[in-house]
Amino acid sequence: MMSVASSTTQSVAAAAGWKSRLHFFWYLTRRSPLTLVGAVIILMVIVMIVAAPLIAPYNPDKLMLSARLQPPSALHWFGTDEVGRDLFSRIIYGSRASCVAAFMIVLISVSIGVVIGCMSAILGGRIDTAIMRLMDVIMALPALVLAMALAAALGPSLVNSMLAVAMVRIPAYVRLARGQTLSLRERVFVKAARTFGASPLYILRWHVLPNAMSPIIVQATLDLGGIVLIAAALSFIGLGAQPPTSEWGALVSTGRNYILDQWWYCTFPGLAILITAMGCNLLGDGIRDMLDPRLGGR
Amino acid sequence: MMVAASEILKPTGQKPAALTIDGLSLEFPTYAGAIKALDDVTIEIGASEIVGLVGESGCGKSVTTMAATRLLPEGRYRVTAGSIRLFGRDPFAMDETELQDVRGKLVSTIFQEPMSALNPTIRIGRQLVGVIQRHEAVSEAEAERTARGILKDMLIAEPERIMRAYPFELSGGMRQRVLIAMAFSCNPGLIIADEPTTALDVTVQAVILRLILDRAKRTGTSVVFISHNIAVVSQLCDRLYVMYAGRIVESGPTRAVLEAPQHPYTQALLRCLPERVEPKAELEAIPGTVPNLLDPPPGCFYRPRCPEANDQCFAKPPSMAPAPDHIVACWRRETIQPSIKASEATQ
């Protein structure tokens, strides 16, 4: 019954153009206010990334030794660090390193994972087995530990830590894409496409991928929050962004030295990480409900 | 420009048969042994001929046609005897690209589940244009024009609107029309209609069948109707093949087969038709079940269910022999000619 109702709303939305489609999404959002909260958080983060120079009151790298370790005030909202840099500005600019890194990690692992997963499903046989067992090995190791080992092996830098985390996340997408491809391959429209002479690549591009995308998108948004955390964690232990680059995890790490007397130093970057990760998870949950009417029809 | 498939494939100047299957035996190896799906199946579908393939579920109707276009999963089956000629060419001698060129261009299939045979994420128009552009070197605009034309031929009132729609917006009957349009879009020489109306309301069945038949007659396309409903097929087809447990048991012109069915199985099938039963009278069913094809019984496969079986039927499977106006595979027909019996005996 739920799915019937939702497919009617969908068809109504599709028939009356973008305006009513917007309305449809608004309706879905209103049904779960938490999704809206998530969306607003992510929107704010995006604005922060794009318009950092406009929002930040100070140059994030400018030293002001006369104003070292100032508590939060009207002048410095989040206080200053040990060399007098404005923490608010550093957090704003830090979003560029932290969130762009997280986004790139998801992008890399989704694209590589989906390609490997689809190939694995299509090639089948021993190649499939070999790929999937390798993925099992990667998944068997704790993600953070493996990412740490990889990042350390590659040498500490933001790009290397990104690659390390992406590597660790790939197996999840490989399994998802492979499962989707295997089940879609048995669907009648894929068989029908074969009888009309479609090549395997055409079928993959036009019949498998579009239908496999929605669980992958959901997984990616849900992952984003966790990846923000892992990326920050790597920077925290010194394997990610290197000074003087401003990055949330690195800020918390330095702030740790002052945690007893200057509480604001690691609190605000920590809050930034927390809120962003939470926003990603809330939005991810919401998107999952939207894309799967059976779950969303509460 | 669009060229009819039959015109390309005319090396000798005369139309070759669309599909010739000669003594095809095919099995699926499994852990428990080989499932003998087809046994000595011989079928010929002439150019512009409408042929019916009738039998109950699992008797090998679909396997036969899928073998002809090599759509069975590669490596999972074995052809043990016989040959296939698709417009004079051997599908087993073609490589994958050639097969892809043949599918959709020379042979198209109409499926039994219109609800799931269209990709839910792509608009109808895009899917139609995709098939046309796969086989014809035409521009996008021209392909769209062709698609609109065929949809109109399928009695779809507003082709533009349908082409912009997604499959979920259409009814089952509409989707089946779209799929028929797709099957005909590249002017194939042969259409395999695999139970095209099974999933549809009775009210639209006749319309859908008419659409296929009319279009095929007009374009000179051969059609194989696969069905378990002998009544539906009998109204459409020039000739009929009745299959049982992977073997052809009776074949001939529709009229001859229906009016004077020779094989006990065909006779039983006809007795099972609700249309032929008096109101309130009990519907007949064929007693027994189809044989297990992993370990088929010796002799005639229908023998365990056959009321007329005798010792001869145990000994060896009957081969096709002439009956009045058609041929039948049954030992119990008096009409079996001595000469054929003799040749059987020497084998």
Image (cartoon, rainbow, N blue to C red):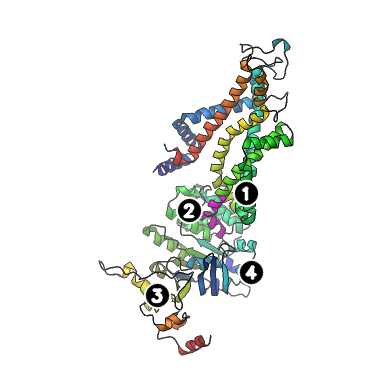
Left or right side of A204 for B276: left
Image position, residue B18 (x, y; %) = 55, 71
Q: In the rendered structure, the residue with mark 1 lies on which chain?
A: A
Disc assigned to residue B38: none
Q: Which mark is residue B304?
A: 3
- Residue appearing at x 58%, y 66% in the figure: B5
Instruction: Pick the residue in front: B245 or A11.
Output: B245
Where's the N terminus of chain A, which quadrant? top left
Determine which of the numbered discs, if any, sits on residue B116 in the image.
Answer: 2
Q: Are marks 2 and 1 on the same chain?
A: no
Crowding at label 1, few (<14), some or many (≥20) Cα neighbours within 10 Å?
Answer: few
| Three-letter residue code for mark 1 | Arg
- Whichever of callouts 4 and 3 sits on the residue coming sooner in the sequence is 4
Under circle 2, the secondary element is loop
Q: The disc labelled 4 sits on which kind of residue? A: Ala
Residue A59, image x and y in percent? 70, 18
Name the front one of labels 1 and 4. Answer: 1
Protein chain holding label 2: B
Q: Is residue B193 visible?
A: yes
Magenta part of the chain: A180-197
Label 1, on which residue? A133
Q: Is the same chain shared between marks 3 and 2?
A: yes
| Foreground of the two, B15 or A129 | A129
* Kind of residue sitting beneath label 3: Pro
Q: CA distance from mark 3 to mark 2?
A: 38 Å
